[in-house]
Image (cartoon, rainbow, N blue to C red):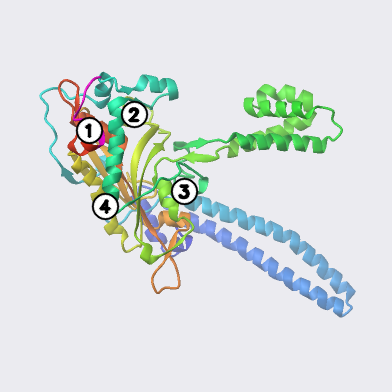
């Protein structure tokens, strides 16, 4: 999130950064919103100052026994009180409009980020490993998993719908082994502290890492029935407060309101009007709309980046605490909005998947070096598994919303005969820190500064499973277990059909 003061001081730099992302200039619009906010503040302050002065003058007029002037001043103060409420509302609206606009602006790319329109313009940074050569046609992971009877998409669809999978037996253990191996590597050799965070988070946490408000449709929200109970109780209480002599039994009222909220307005409109006259329909209608607008209670995390980065929200850290490096292996949930028709088979694009996340919190001076370090940590996972991969630098047109610069690690999948993303490593500058109000106090300094945040996959467990299956497949359909994972598999060396 950008500071409007910085945009006011650097409008050309701001608009040029947006242009590199393929976006239209916006500085003049934002400054107009800020001007409206400043004007509203000015009117509010002027009215408040005059109201205070007028109140003081009333006392002076009364002391001088000038009743006529006192009455005139009282009328003026009363009018100012009314006008002040309007000015304050205008200020709130203007501030909200500016905040909303700022919250939907993506981060600006660093100067060394290559210009481009989409993923086809991402230059290769470097590559590792030799692509395996097979004496047979390599199969895709879902062909292998289903033939082993250890990967079940049909049952998952019955349970949850499309884009879910049930992994079984040795394949489920291999997936668990991958996550444990990654955590042990990052905590034992790379200096990360393991965290077991909540996977349900509030709006504020999702806003802090910039999943909200712009990417609301990509998320999965949850609901708590207790809130609906509270609404029903409020409706019933309001009904009896307005209709104290009504003879309808409270239990019946609760039942009707409950059905109304559960089944929707249209189906119960006639019944509610019959039982509660106009009150039920009007009150239930407004309450239902309120529920529809505010029904999300907690969000399922799309990545552990959300809780891990928000560990420092609304905090002031000491500089000596930085850098903070944390990691977690969690389920992740994504609605995959807009991905219809893409990767419809297999585990590449799932609604639920497991990922090991890396997050660093640093000073501005440490951030770029930390970015390179994090890339190395994620690469080491694939090196230990002996999986071929390449690193690309995302161009300006393919960067994530909160990123200043991103490296993607793409692992080789023989079954698809192409590289696929398995990790993204991003430096975000103070973009997320401003949204979280996460700061630190430099040594021997009185003022605070915003921290810089970085995040990356270390790596996506589900896609690592896909890569192991395809790169370690044998002609008979069995899978050789990579050496690095055998201690986590009880010494098992091959996964074959049971």
User: Which numbered disc, 1 or 2, marks the residue that appears first in the sequence?
Assistant: 2
The answer to whether residue 47 is above or below residue 379 is below
Decide which of tag 1 and tag 4 comes sooner along the chain.
Answer: 4
Q: Which mark is residue 190?
A: 4
Circle 2 or circle 4, nearest the eye = 4
For mark 2, does the 10 Å Cα neighbourhood hold few (<14), some (14 to 19), or many (20 or more) residues?
few
Instruction: Report whether 447 appears left or right of 133.
Output: right
Q: Position of residue 74 (x, y in %)?
A: 82, 67
Q: Dot 4 surroundings within 10 Å: few (below 14), some, or many (20 or more)?
A: some
Left or right, 58 with respect to 344, comes to right
Q: Earlier in the sequence, mark 3 or mark 1?
A: 3
Which portion, as a residue range, is magenta?
488-498
Query: Does the magenta segment cover residue 495?
Result: yes
Regarding residue 113, the answer to whether it shows in the image is no
Q: Residue at x 83, y 34 (%)?
A: 243
Residue position marked by numbered label 3 in the rendering = 104
The correct choice, above or below, for 281 with respect to 212 in the image is above
Label 4's element? loop
Give me the C-alpha separation between circle 4 and circle 3: 35 Å
Q: Do callouts 3 and 1 mark residues in contact (Cβ within 8 Å)?
A: no
Choose mark 1 or mark 2, whichever is in front: 1
User: Which residue is tagged 1?
Assistant: 468
Judged left or right of residue 228, residue 113 is left
The residue carrying mark 2 is 342
* Residue 318 position in % (x across, y down): 41, 65
CA gap between label 3 and label 2 equals 26 Å
Q: Disc 4 vs disc 3: which is toward the camera?
A: 4
Q: CA distance from mark 1 to mark 2?
A: 22 Å
Q: Residues within 10 Å of mark 3 (few under 14, many from 20)?
A: some
């Amino acid at each position: 999130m950008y500071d409007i003061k910085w945009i006011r001081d650097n409008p050309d730099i701001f608009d040029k950064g947006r242009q590199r992302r393929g976006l239209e200039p916006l500085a003049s619009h934002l400054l107009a919103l800020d001007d409206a906010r400043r004007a509203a503040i000015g009117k509010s302050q002027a009215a408040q100052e005059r109201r205070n002065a007028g109140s003081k003058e009333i006392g002076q007029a009364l002391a001088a026994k000038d009743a006529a002037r006192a009455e005139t001043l009282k009328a003026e103060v009363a009018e100012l009180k009314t006008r002040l409420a309007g000015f304050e509302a205008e200020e709130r609206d203007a501030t909200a409009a500016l905040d909303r606009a700022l919250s939907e602006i993506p981060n600006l790319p660093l100067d060394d980020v290559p210009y481009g329109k989409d993923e086809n313009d991402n230059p290769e940074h470097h590559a590792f490993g030799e692509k395996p050569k097979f004496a047979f046609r390599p199969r895709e992971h879902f062909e292998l998993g289903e033939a082993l009877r250890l990967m079940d998409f049909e049952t998952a669809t019955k349970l949850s719908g499309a884009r879910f999978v049930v992994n079984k037996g040795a394949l489920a253990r291999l997936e668990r082994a991958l996550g444990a191996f990654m955590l042990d590597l990052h905590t034992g050799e790379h200096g990360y502290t393991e965290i077991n965070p909540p996977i349900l988070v509030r709006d504020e946490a999702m806003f802090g890492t910039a999943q909200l408000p712009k990417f609301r449709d990509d998320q999965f929200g949850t609901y708590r029935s207790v809130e609906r109970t509270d609404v029903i109780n409020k409706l019933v209480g309001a009904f009896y407060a307005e209709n104290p002599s009504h003879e309808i039994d409270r239990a019946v009222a609760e039942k009707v309101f409950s059905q109304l909220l559960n089944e929707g307005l249209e189906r119960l409109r006639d019944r509610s009007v019959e039982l509660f006259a106009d009150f039920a329909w009007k009150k239930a209608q407004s309450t239902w709309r309120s529920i529809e607008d505010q029904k999300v209670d907690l969000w399922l995390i799309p990545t552990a980046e959300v809780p891990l980065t928000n560990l420092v929200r609304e905090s002031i850290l000491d500089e000596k605490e930085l850098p903070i490096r944390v990691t977690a292996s969690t389920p992740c949930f994504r609605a995959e909005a807009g991905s219809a028709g893409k990767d419809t088979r297999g585990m590449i694009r799932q609604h639920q998947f497991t990922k090991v996340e890396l997050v660093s919190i640093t000073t501005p001076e440490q951030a770029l070096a930390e970015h390179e370090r994090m890339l190395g940590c994620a690469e080491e996972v694939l090196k230990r598994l002996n999986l071929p991969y390449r690193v690309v630098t995302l161009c300006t047109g393919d960067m994530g919303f909160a990123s200043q610069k991103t490296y993607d690690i793409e692992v080789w999948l023989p079954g698809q005969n192409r590289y696929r993303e398995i990790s993204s490593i991003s430096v975000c500058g103070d973009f997320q820190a401003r949204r979280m109000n996460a700061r630190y106090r430099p040594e021997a300094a009185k003022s605070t500064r915003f921290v810089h945040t970085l995040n990356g996959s270390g790596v996506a467990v589900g896609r690592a499973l896909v890569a192991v299956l395809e790169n370690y497949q044998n002609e008979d359909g069995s899978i050789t277990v990579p050496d690095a994972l055998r201690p986590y598999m009880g010494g098992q060396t091959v996964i074959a059909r049971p």
